[in-house]
Amino acid sequence: MVSVQSYRNLSTLLYALSVVEALAGLILIFGSSWVLSMAPGILTLADTAFLSIFFKAIGILALGLGYLLCVTARDPARYVAVIDMLVFILIASAILIGYALGAVHLGRYFPANYIVVRIVVQVILAAVLIAMRPKAAARA
């Protein structure tokens, strides 16, 4: 069992990320109205209903990603594609948030320092996952 011993730190990181994703998914599924209450600006009833359903759908995807990360944490060498997908999501999300900060002026609604720190944390996490990623996939 080379993969269990050599990827212990990666497995721990993936388990931690799976717990965070699962909690985020559950909060979005069951507490979407609570999440919407923190949204800045005035939302109409139609906007709130649409966003509530949209947040529940995103919560289902986050719950699924949490499950995939938990399975990947058991044998990272076998599920390298899931790690690659997570790195892509982190980088694409950081780029999208950076674009929203500059083009849509997201800093008017949320603290710009928080958004910049979030982008930096996402890029650092993606770099750590790339560095810890198994170099050779397990062969059957």
Image (tube, rainbow, N blue to C red):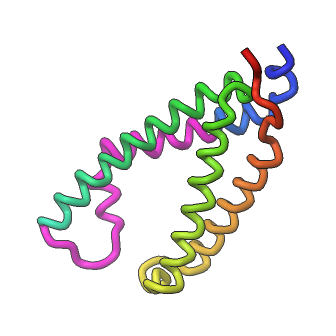
Magenta stretch prevailing secondary structure: helix
Q: Position of residue 97 (x, y in %)?
A: 53, 71
Q: Is residue 39 magenta?
A: yes
Q: Residue shown at 53%/78% (left/top)?
A: 99
Judge from the rendering whether residue 65 lies leftward or rightward of residue 29; answer left or right. Answer: right
Res 51 → quadrant: bottom left
Judge from the rendering whether residue 78 lies leftward or rightward of residue 67; answer left or right. Answer: right
Above-or-below relation of 17 to 115: above
Above-or-below relation of 86 to 138: below
Res 134 → quadrant: top right
Q: Residue shown at 63%/37% (left/top)?
A: 81
Q: Is residue 4 magenta?
A: no
Q: Position of residue 67 (x, y in %)?
A: 51, 30
Judge from the rendering whether residue 87 lies leftward or rightward of residue 44; answer left or right. Answer: right
Looking at this view, name the residue that lies furthest to the left: 45
For the residue pair 97 and 92, the one nearer the viewer reads as: 92
Q: Position of residue 62 (x, y in %)?
A: 45, 43
Looking at this view, name the residue that lies furthest to the front: 140
For the magenta stretch, what is the residue range?
A: 17-45
Quadrant housing the N terminus: top right
Q: Residue shown at 83%/37% (left/top)?
A: 135
Quadrant housing the C terminus: top right
- The number of numbered discs placed on residues in the rendered structure image is 0
Judge from the rendering whether residue 78 lies leftward or rightward of residue 44; answer left or right. Answer: right
Q: Position of residue 120 (x, y in %)?
A: 69, 67
